[in-house]
Amino acid sequence: MALSLRDEISGFGQAVLTGFVMESASFLCRCGLLIAVSLCISACPESSRGEVLIADFDDLPVGSLGNRPFTDGGITFSNLDTRGGFYNRFSIQLVSAGSGFSAPNCLGFGQPNSNPGRFGSMDISFSGEATKVSLDVFATMSLPGLENLLTLQGLRGGGVVDSQAVLVSYWTPFDGQLSIFGNYDSVRLIASGEYSQGTVMLELDNVTLTVIPEPQTVCLLCVGLAFFCRRFRHVNTSGCQSSTDAIQAYAGDPG
């Protein structure tokens, strides 16, 4: 039975509309993929991007924190080792030394306000990946004639990938900034040497990290969206071909 003119026009319109919708959806899918790729690129570690975390200890009450881990400004300090010191503990104390320190508080070791205190090593951790680490330190030795090293280490996967070390003595204490640049998932501050079990007398302030958030979540989103677009493109190609055939049939074009 022959189709009426109205049926032919209606069928032709539906075919055109179907093709338009499929092409529009394909375009939107490609736009979404480009946006996801841009987000993934923006999440990749680069020294020009990142959040700055600062631990200045000014919001913490003066006194002993014990030997348990504590966090200030998004930075966690843990695993303190004073190597035989009678008071193996973190302490928040009032600034009394350190040319780069910011009042009122700084981080000390041992008894509060026994600055500076005996220090062997500690770990510094954070969420994400650090591209820059710096801290202001005042370090000396307990007796004249002794010299040890104080080293800031940047670690990745448990291994040291970068470091800065300074020589510390009683007559020439180190009063300045330690800093490293690279890509680190954790940081360690460690003293070493032949005297006093390799310890120094230390206090520090203004621990500053430039941290890149971990990009796994965004990248997984990109992979999922790319897979969806690939599947949609396959379906869309078949749908568009069917629409084209329908339009040609209604237009009287045998192709």
Image (cartoon, grey):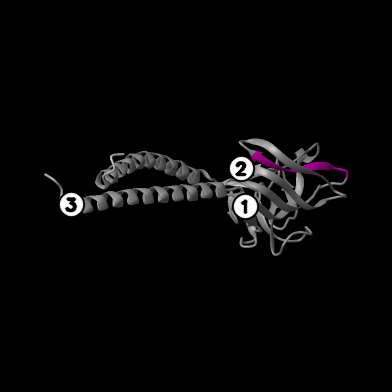
Q: Quadrant of residue 120?
A: top right
> For the residues marked 1 and 3, what is the alpha-carbon distance in whole angstroms?
60 Å
Q: Is residue 149 magenta?
A: yes
What amino acid does circle 2 point to?
Asp
Q: Earlier in the sequence, mark 3 or mark 2?
A: 3
Q: Which residues are magenta?
A: 145-155
Tally of marks: 3
Q: Nearer the viewer, residue 154 or 198?
A: 154
Residue found 25% across the figure and 50% down from its top: 12
What amino acid does circle 3 point to?
Asp
Residue found 37% across the figure and 38% down from its top: 234
Which element is circle 2 on? loop
Report x, y in % for residue 192: 76, 39
Q: Which residue corresponds to mark 1? A: 49
Question: Residues at badges 1 and 2 in contact (C-beta under 8 Å)?
Answer: no
Which element is circle 3 on? helix
Residue found 71% across the figure and 64% down from its top: 103
Q: Earlier in the sequence, mark 1 or mark 2?
A: 1
Q: Is residue 32 visible?
A: yes
Residue found 72% across the figure and 53% down from its top: 204
The C terminus sits in image quarter: top left
Q: Which residue corresponds to mark 3? A: 7
What amino acid does circle 1 point to?
Arg
